[in-house]
Structures are given as structure tokens and as C-alpha cells.
Amino acid sequence: LKLVSQGAEALVFVTEKHPYLPKDIKPAGLTNVNNFIVKYRPRKPYRHEQLDLQITKSRTAGEAKLLYKLDSLNIKAPKLIALDAINGIIWMEFLGFRLPNGNFSSLKNWLWFIEKKGESEAIGQLAKDVMRLVGYAIAELHLNEIVHGDLTSSNIVLVKESETEEKYSVALIDFGLSSYSNLVEDKAVDIYVLERALVSTHPQFSELYNEWLLEGYHSLYSEKKKINAWRDVERRLAAVRLRGRKRSMLG
């Protein structure tokens, strides 16, 4: 196991070992058959032991069920491989690749990588296409009444669609705080959290990135003839932004 991420609630590892298949048998239907992700929720000593077990089991099982649901909806996210809810462990598909600088292909790392090449790359057609794909992926989630709950550019991954061309798809990862919701407020907050993350990590080009993000989001609502639903999200997003600005001014 190699630790790749450590958050407040869970540790994320990458491993070459499948949970139950022998080494010489490769699993079918996965983007990467040589690497897998293990997400582990460790025990929290500050919580009562029985309560901690209950919370760990519930949250782990809930996340696993959501991954299964996303797969059934054909929404790009890691496929569920195995689950040990009692011990807080999920095995899932490894998505993404290593960039030429060695970093993992999260949206944040990829945008940093192209920004270092210069402005023409940072705001070029490829960046525009990727950001629209991000917005489209979020809209897929929201139109199925699912909110991510922690949408940052670290929780969005680029997946190679071609070995010879710069052609990518976009996947969402880390559904530990996700939930089912048909509330416009929750969907607007999801988008706002990502907007703020882009402003924080890519300040020079964030205005364009966020504009393209909403273009992609809006395009799926248009495809599905959900224009009134889009307008509701758009209006609520403006209100959420206003609240955010007021909080910033007040400190």
C-alpha cells in the first residue's frame, strides 16, 4: 500500500494487489487493471467506541452504495470493487494517470501543469473543452438528484481517452460527503464550492475557468430540456455568491 492522500476522515492508498483475484488474473471492465484504490476510515479515539463503529459502517456503506449507483447511471466515477463496511474499507477503481511532471492527473494538477506552459495553453481550446466537461459531469450528478458535498479541483480527475492524442474524459472522486438531494440550494452550493476552489488555486484564469464550467453545466440542462431547472440553479447560485461575498467582507 502506498499512501496518496490523508484527509480528516479517511486515508487513501494505491496498491497493485486486487482484494480477491490472484496476481495472474486481471479484472475486466476497469480503466486500470494494475492499480487499485483503497479508502480506509480509521477509528476515531475521541468518539465512543460503539458510536464510532456505527458511524464508520454507515458512512462507508453509504459511499459504496453511491459508487454502485453512479456506475448504474453511467456517470464517470471509480467503480466499486469490494467493501468491508465494518472496518471502514472500500476498494475501488483507480482512475487518472501521471502527468509528465510526475503529479497525479487531478484537475488542479493538470491546470497548474498547463498554466506553467504559458497563457496560450492555460486558456486554450483544450482547457476550455476540459472545463466544459467538468461542468457537464457535475450537471449529470445534479440531474440525478445527487450532490457531491466536497467539489474541489482535487476531487475531479482527468482520464486519458487516447494514448496518442490529448483527449480526456472527466471523473468525479471522493464521495464521502455526498448525498441525495433535490434542493436547488444544495446544487448551487456544490458549484460555488468549486468556483471558490478554482479562484484559490488558479487566480489568474479562474474567471474564464468558471465561465466555461457553467457553459458545460448549462449544456446538459439544455440537452435534457430542463431550462427552468437551470434558471433555478442559476438564480440560487447568484444568491449563494452574494452571501459568500458578504461573509468575506465581514471577515
Image: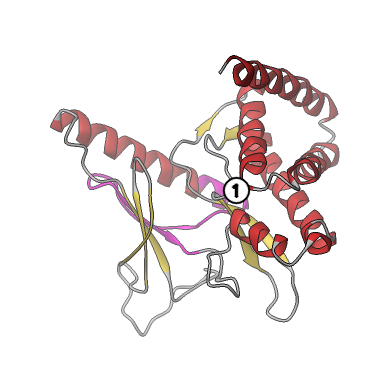
**Which residue is located at x 53 percent, y 67 percent?**
103
In which quadrant will I find the C terminus? top right
Q: In this view, does 145 lie to the left or right of 14?
A: right
Outermost residue on the left side: it is 49
The span shown in magenta is 69-94
Circle 1: is it few (<14), some (14-19), or many (20+) Cα within 10 Å? many
Q: Is residue 230 left or right of residue 52?
A: right
In which quadrant will I find the N terminus? bottom left
Closer-to-camera residue (211/225): 211
- Asked if the magenta segment contains residue 92, the reply would be yes
Q: In which quarter of the image is residue 118?
A: bottom right
**Which residue is located at x 80 percent, y 37 percent?**
221
Q: Where is residue 203 in the image (x, y as percent from the top left)?
A: 69, 44
- Asked if the magenta segment contains residue 195, the reply would be no
Q: What element carries label 1?
A: loop
Residue tagged 1:
153
Q: Determine whether 92 is above or below 100 in the image.
A: above
**Which residue is located at x 80 percent, y 45 percent?**
208
Q: Position of residue 152 (x, y in %)?
A: 57, 43
Q: Determine whether 215 is above or below 133 in the image.
A: above
Count of numbered labels shown in the rendering: 1
**Which residue is located at x 78 percent, y 26 percent?**
234
Specify the color scheme: secondary structure
Q: Disc 1 residue type?
A: Ser
Q: Quadrant of residue 115?
A: bottom right
Closer-to-camera residue (145/135): 135
Outermost residue on the bottom side: it is 24
Q: Where is residue 49 in the image (x, y as percent from the top left)?
A: 14, 32
Q: Position of residue 17 (x, y in %)?
A: 33, 73
